[in-house]
């Protein structure tokens, strides 16, 4: 959920950004996402067809699994280690602006999807209606938090059926924590363990969200990454190639607009509770960085008082909202996550 960095002196048009990302991807090994001039649309025909398996690297395999809800084809992708039968499943819920590709940046060993798959998971990620490669919506306010939770609940039910499980785990990031917490509260029978990564426990500040769609740009996509006093990105915290890979993926999958329903839900007064922790029955990991500008740390530090037995709070010193992609912290993030998930 990037900050507003409108005062930056550098700004790319979409065409310029795509050209820069292509250059970085060509020269440097590791960032292998392709970038096209047009944002791909969801294949609603494919939602009615058989699962399409694709190779995402020598050790991993992904497949798109058909899911349609409310007449909209949803992009649901399952990733696992090749030639291994996963013994558990996890669903990842994305943030308010950019879609589920955020969890699988193909650069070095940063990908959260592939890390979780290496732990023996079938890793599922969903694009909420109107986001990424899911079907378009005409009203950007329609896929709000409540609506997104229904999309995620439908995905969780399909995951359990497809993988022949009794339950699955669920991880939400940023706005995705408000979505994931609603799923866990409304359908406790579906969720074994819950992860709230960078949880928006209270409003981020009252703001008028008047436009149904957010207008995306390159700087906005990059603005979660920590900066130096002069506004440049801190190379000690974040690899600049990773920033280019992340932002070019945002352009490729999310394009110039994203639905604003979720943003309107969380852009409320800081005293407004956005997650009902007491309603959650699953053991929950609350994990974040202590330099995250969006979090209410009074609420974060008091979260275990409301969560069920077996819940854990992990705060990573120095980490920000995008701690899973920060050089000094991402292995620590992964290790704490793995310890909780068992």
Image (cartoon, rainbow, N blue to C red):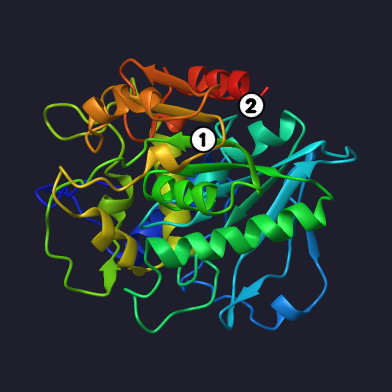
Element under label 1? Answer: strand
Q: Nearer the viewer, residue 287 or 248?
A: 287
Q: Is residue 85 visible?
A: yes
Q: Earlier in the sequence, mark 2 or mark 1?
A: 1
State the image coordinates of residue 212 (x, y, percent, origin top left): 27, 75
**Label disc, if present, on residue 135 of the rendered structure:** none
Residue at the image point whose x is 57% and y is 36% from the top: 282
- From the viewer's perspective, is residue 332 above or below residue 150? above
Residue at the image point whose x is 16% and y is 72% from the top: 210
Q: How many marks?
A: 2
Element under label 2? Answer: helix
- What whole-number distance in Å separates the C-alpha atoms at marks 2 and 1? 9 Å
217 sits left or right of 269 in the view: right
- Residue under circle 1? 195
Examine the image and state in which quarter residue 283 appears: top right
Examine the image and state in which quarter residue 291 appears: top left
- From the viewer's perspective, is residue 278 above or below residue 211? above
Residue at the image point whose x is 30% and y is 63% from the top: 216
State the image coordinates of residue 121 (x, y, percent, origin top left): 74, 37
48 sits left or right of 7 in the view: right
Residue at the image point whose x is 53% and y is 44% from the top: 103
- Residue under circle 2? 341
Q: Is residue 105 visible?
A: no
Image marks 2 and 1: residues in contact by CB distance under 8 Å: yes
- From the viewer's perspective, is residue 102 above or below residue 339? below
């Amino acid at each position: 959920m990037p900050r507003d960095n409108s005062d930056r002196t550098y700004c790319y048009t979409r065409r310029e950004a795509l050209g820069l990302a292509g250059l970085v991807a060509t020269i440097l090994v590791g960032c292998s996402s392709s970038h096209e001039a047009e944002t791909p649309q969801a294949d609603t025909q494919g939602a009615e067809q058989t699962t399409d398996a694709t190779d995402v690297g020598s050790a991993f395999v992904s497949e798109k699994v058909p899911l349609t809800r409310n007449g909209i084809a949803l992009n649901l992708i399952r990733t696992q280690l090749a030639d291994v039968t996963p013994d558990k499943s996890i669903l990842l819920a994305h943030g308010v602006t950019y879609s589920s590709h955020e969890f699988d940046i193909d650069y070095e060993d940063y990908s959260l999807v592939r890390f979780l798959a290496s732990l023996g998971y079938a890793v599922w990620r969903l694009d909420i209606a109107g986001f990424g490669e899911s079907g378009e919506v005409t009203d950007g306010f329609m896929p709000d938090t409540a609506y997104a939770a229904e999309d995620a609940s439908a995905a969780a039910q399909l995951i359990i059926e497809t993988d022949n499980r009794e339950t699955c785990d669920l991880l939400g990031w940023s706005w995705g924590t408000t979505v994931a917490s609603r799923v866990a509260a409304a359908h406790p029978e579906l969720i074994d363990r819950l992860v709230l990564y960078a949880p928006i426990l209270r409003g981020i500040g009252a703001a008028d969200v008047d436009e149904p769609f957010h207008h995306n740009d390159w700087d906005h996509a990059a603005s979660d990454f920590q900066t130096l006093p002069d506004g440049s990105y801190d190379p000690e915290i974040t690899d600049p190639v990773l920033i280019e890979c992340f932002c070019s993926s945002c352009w490729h999958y999310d394009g110039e607009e994203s639905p604003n329903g979720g943003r309107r839900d969380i852009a409320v007064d800081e005293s407004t509770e956005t997650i009902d922790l007491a309603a959650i029955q699953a053991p929950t990991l609350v994990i974040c960085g202590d330099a995250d500008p969006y979090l209410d740390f009074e609420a974060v530090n008091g979260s275990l008082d409301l969560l069920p037995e077996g819940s854990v709070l992990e705060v990573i010193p120095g980490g920000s909202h995008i701690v899973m992609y920060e050089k000094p912290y991402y292995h620590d993030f992964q290790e704490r996550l793995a310890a909780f998930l068992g």
